[in-house]
Image (cartoon, grey):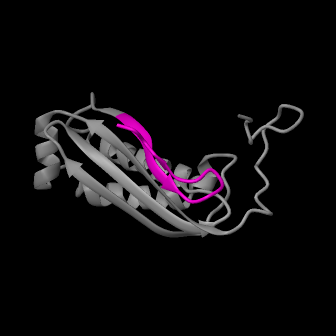
Amino acid sequence: MELTHINEQGRARMVDVTKKDVTFRTAEAEGRVHMAPATVEIIRTGGAPKGDVLAVAQVAGIMAAKRTHELIPMCHPLRLTAVDIRFTLEEAAVHIRTKVKCKGETGVEMEALTAASAAALTIYDMCKAVQRDMEIGEIRLCRKSGGKLGDYEKEW
């Protein structure tokens, strides 16, 4: 399989999507912020020193999805039609699930992954006053639809 972001000289390039059809595309990603059960309880009860952790993380994730092309050099600016971020409080973690949609010439996988990453980083930032050894992990693409390569779903 060829790397599409490399030109004939072996240098980075932004892929030319000029001739690609506009299609409906979706992507879902996830991640987790592992923390002490006491920190999860602070999030659940709204007692974090900086305010509503999940509300701020949700806005951060949405903003990050919309600005992915400014963060990841070879990403195209996309006109996103939907971004949804959901959180599940687990015993010792916050599970993040993102879903991004658009009609465009290229997929939204990077936008979904960026949204999950930014939401996770925001949760860390909002809670670091009470716990500094939290761990961010398991950022991964769960599924995508649309485009030349077709649908993908992570096998569990």
Q: Is residue 47 visible?
A: no
Q: Quadrant of the N terminus?
A: top right
Left or right: residue 63 versus residue 4 is: left
**Looking at the image, which is closer to me, 40 or 83?**
83
Left or right: residue 92 versus residue 79 is: left
Position of residue 81 measured from the top left corner of the image (x, y, whole percent): 51, 72
Numbered-mark total:
0
The residue under the point 36% across, 33% down is 137
Position of residue 54 measured from the top left corner of the image (x, y, whole percent): 26, 55
Query: Would you place residue 27 above or below residue 12 in this image?
Result: below
The residue under the point 57% across, 60% down is 146
Left or right: residue 79 versus residue 12 is: left
> Does the magenta-highlighted stretch encompass residue 15?
no
The residue under the point 60% across, 48% down is 71
Query: Would you place residue 3 above or below residue 87 in this image?
Result: above
Which residue is farthest top?
Answer: 133
**Looking at the image, which is closer to me, 2 or 35?**
2
Q: Quadrant of the C terminus?
A: top left
Which residue is farthest right?
Answer: 9
Position of residue 100 measured from the top left corner of the image (x, y, whole percent): 47, 61
Position of residue 58 measured from the top left corner of the image (x, y, whole percent): 34, 59
Give the residues in magenta. Answer: 137-156
Q: Is residue 136 visible?
A: yes
Where residue 21 sits, quadrant-wise, is bottom right
The residue under the point 88% across, 36% down is 8
Left or right: residue 50 versus residue 65 is: left
> Does the magenta-highlighted stretch encompass residue 143?
yes
Where residue 51 sits, quadrant-wise, is bottom left
